[in-house]
Amino acid sequence: MDGGERNLSEIDRLIIKILKEEGKPISTYMLTKKIGISWATVNIHCHKLMSAGKISGEMRESISGRKMFWWIER
């Protein structure tokens, strides 16, 4: 585990694990369903991970409106 990995919380590691397993962009809402914690908590952790360069994200149009999608660059 490199120095950046030691600073990650259990939630951060779980988000990264799920995004790696998915292999495609998924919404904040889908992450909340997979992890079982609040949307706000997932959103905060995803934005933190994006700022640290661990994951990527962007706002996209979906059938139900605009949503934030997250992924890991391969």
Image (tube, rainbow, N blue to C red):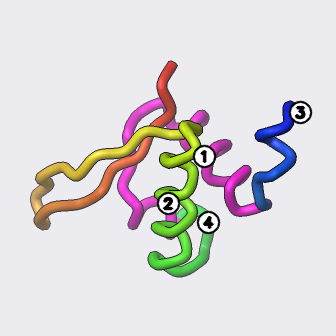
Q: Is residue 57 above or below residue 66?
A: above
- Mark 4–mark 3 Cα distance, whole angstroms, equals 23 Å
State the image coordinates of residue 54 (x, y, percent, origin top left). 58, 38
- The tag on residue 56 is none
Residue under label 1: 18
Q: Amino acid at mark 3?
A: Met
Residue under label 4: 35
In the picture, measured across the screen, residue 59 lies left or right of residue 3, that is left
For the residues bearing labels 2 and 4, Cβ distance under 8 angstroms: yes
Give the magenta-colored segment's residue range: 10-33
Q: Amino acid at mark 1?
A: Ile
User: Few, some or many C-alpha atoms within 10 Å of disc 1 (few <14, some 14-19, many ≥20)?
Assistant: some
Residue under label 3: 1
For the residues bearing labels 4 and 3, Cβ distance under 8 angstroms: no
- State which tag comes first along the sequence, 2 or 3: 3
State the image coordinates of residue 32 (x, y, percent, origin top left). 50, 68
30 or 61: nearer the viewer: 61
Q: Residue at x 46, y 67 (%)?
A: 43
Q: Amino acid at mark 2?
A: Leu
Image quarter where the N terminus lies is top right
- Mark 2–mark 4 Cα distance, whole angstroms, equals 6 Å
Q: Residue at x 36, y 55 (%)?
A: 27
- Mark 4–mark 1 Cα distance, whole angstroms, equals 9 Å
Mark 3 element type: loop
For the residues bearing labels 1 and 2, Cβ distance under 8 angstroms: yes
- State which tag comes first along the sequence, 4 or 1: 1
Query: Residue 11 lies in magenta, yes or no?
Result: yes
For the residues bearing labels 4 and 1, Cβ distance under 8 angstroms: yes
